[in-house]
Image (cartoon, rainbow, N blue to C red):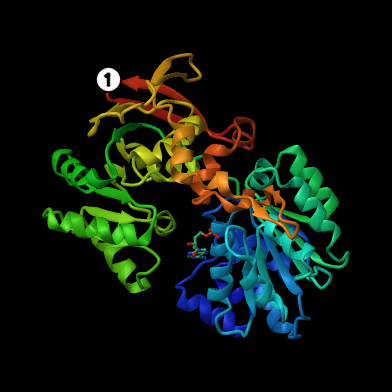
Amino acid sequence: MNSFNDFGLAEPILRALTEEKYVTPTPIQAQTIPLLLAKRDVIGIAQTGTGKTAAFALPILNHLAANRVRPQPKTCRVLVLSPTRELSGQILDSFRAYGRHLRIQSTLAIGGVSMGAQVRSLMNGVDVLVATPGRLLDLIQSNALRLSSVEVFVLDEADRMLDMGFIRDIRKIITKLPAQRQTLLFSATMPADIAELARQMLKDPAKVSVTPQATTVERIAQRIVHVDRGSKPKMLSDIILQEKVDRVLVFTRTKHGADKVVRGLNKDGIAAEAIHGNKSQNQRERVLKDFRDGRIRTLVATDIAARGIDVEGISHVINFDLPNIPESYVHRIGRTARAGADGIAISLCSHDELPFLRDIEKLIRMAIPATGTATQPRPGARPPQQHQDRNGRGHGRPGQQQRNAKARDGGRSERGGQRNGNGQKHNHGRDDHHAQPDRQSRHQVPHSTASQGPRPIASTQPVGSDFAKVSFMQPR
Ligand code: AMP
């Protein structure tokens, strides 16, 4: 499926997708949407960043558009369970964006905020409810919600749910759902306990999987530059001016970030352009052509936008932000060193990104050499830990993971519990913290879970003191 028009989605949904500037379905969308439109139960192995939200939201909206019935009071027709309130908010936003031309009632049931408003918005019933497990059970317990009319149930990020200790809550919720329903389960990995949960929850499910591709990335010299977040723009300009850059692709995590980086570079006299989802197709094509023809040497892109970039002769990839999904790092650096050329990948890593660095190093099974520390370690920071690659070599590396998690969390986890009707505190508030779901979860995943599934196998050959080369092979 090369176009959203091929799925037979309702016109108002297609119109919204055009407005969102979605042109080509991502692989998970191409595989999942037809199955869901055919009313199959589906297990999807896919991570955030693959477009999985639209993969389930679009066919669900299509179902609602085709079967217009008024929801019963205090019920929902579609229930999406997600582990964190941030992720829940993003999922609701997606439903609202893709469903903006349909009259769909949708709401959020998440912890950490008062229940009153949620009780009120459920009073007349809703089409789509996106919830975290603890708050959902609280609402059911307070007779604000019944799940007896759920037609479609989505369990998103199932492995994270289990990591966060939600299994009991999920089991309880499942018992309250009608037997006749469509069920979807999405998970980044499929450990045995998720497979067992899926066996109990789904009927004859179709399986779709978009496991990150193991790229062949050879001859790439990699380097980490530890730098304060605020010093990144200057560091980026310095690198571009000092290195022998033929063509450089700079990655940022967000579209807004990409525009900001371009403005900073322009200010420093470096011609640069951004390509991302907010740019029109024409703009993107023009910028890519300029980059390909060498009229601009610096292109700033987000991960999704970069999927379409196939340009030879990229001498450098610079990660202005470290990706929160480690596989994205492999994809990003694979943009350089094409066609047997040497390539250089430099990543600017601020203090708060150390957990991402740790995940990347775990994935590629090597420590990336660090240079050019722009700041002193923070007071009280632990000394670097020894960390061994698979050849048994030790590497000094930052060991700040837990502290970072707590700092980012702002101590919210300690006040997450909600009072129930009897004034007793119970710990459903687990879903009330995790201010930044991706960041948080990625480094919270226990090693055993994080390392499941096919992974590229890396072999390292240190080159000089600053660089390491890494080659990736398909796991056998
Ligand atoms: P998700 O994996 O659902 O979190 O999606 C990751 C990002 O990709 C979100 O910012 C979506 O808006 C965007 N996205 C999803 N599908 C597409 C598509 N087909 N084309 C362009 N962007 C997309």
Residue at (24%, 48%) from the top-left corner? 247
Q: Mark 1 points at which residue?
A: 464
Instruction: Between residue 468 and residue 151, name the one nearer to us.
Output: 151
Place residue 395 in its image quadrant: top left
Q: Is residue 142 above or below residue 199?
A: below
Instruction: Between residue 74 and residue 443, name the one nearer to us.
Output: 74
Q: In this view, does 448 lie above or below 331?
A: above
Q: Is residue 196 left or right of residue 297?
A: right
Res 213 seen here? no
Q: Position of residue 65 (x, y in %)?
A: 68, 82
Instruction: Between residue 45 and residue 181, name the one nearer to us.
Output: 181
Q: What element carries label 1?
A: loop
Q: In this view, does 367 lie above or below 129?
A: above
Q: Where is residue 262 in the image (x, y as percent from the top left)?
A: 23, 58
Q: In this view, does 222 lie to the left or right of 452?
A: left
Q: Position of residue 410 (x, y in %)?
A: 46, 46
Residue extending farthest right: 179
Place residue 104 in its image quadrant: bottom right
**Label 1 neighbourhood size at 10 Å, few (<14), some (14-19), many (20+)?**
few
Q: Is residue 316 left or right of residue 307?
A: left
Place residue 219 in its image quadrant: top left
Quadrant housing the N terminus: bottom right
Residue at (44%, 57%) from the top-left corner? 304
Quadrant housing the C terminus: top right
- Cβ of mark 1 under 8 A from ligand 1: no
Q: How many labels does the image show?
A: 1
Res 108 seen here? yes
Residue extending farthest left: 269
Mark 1: which amino acid? Gly
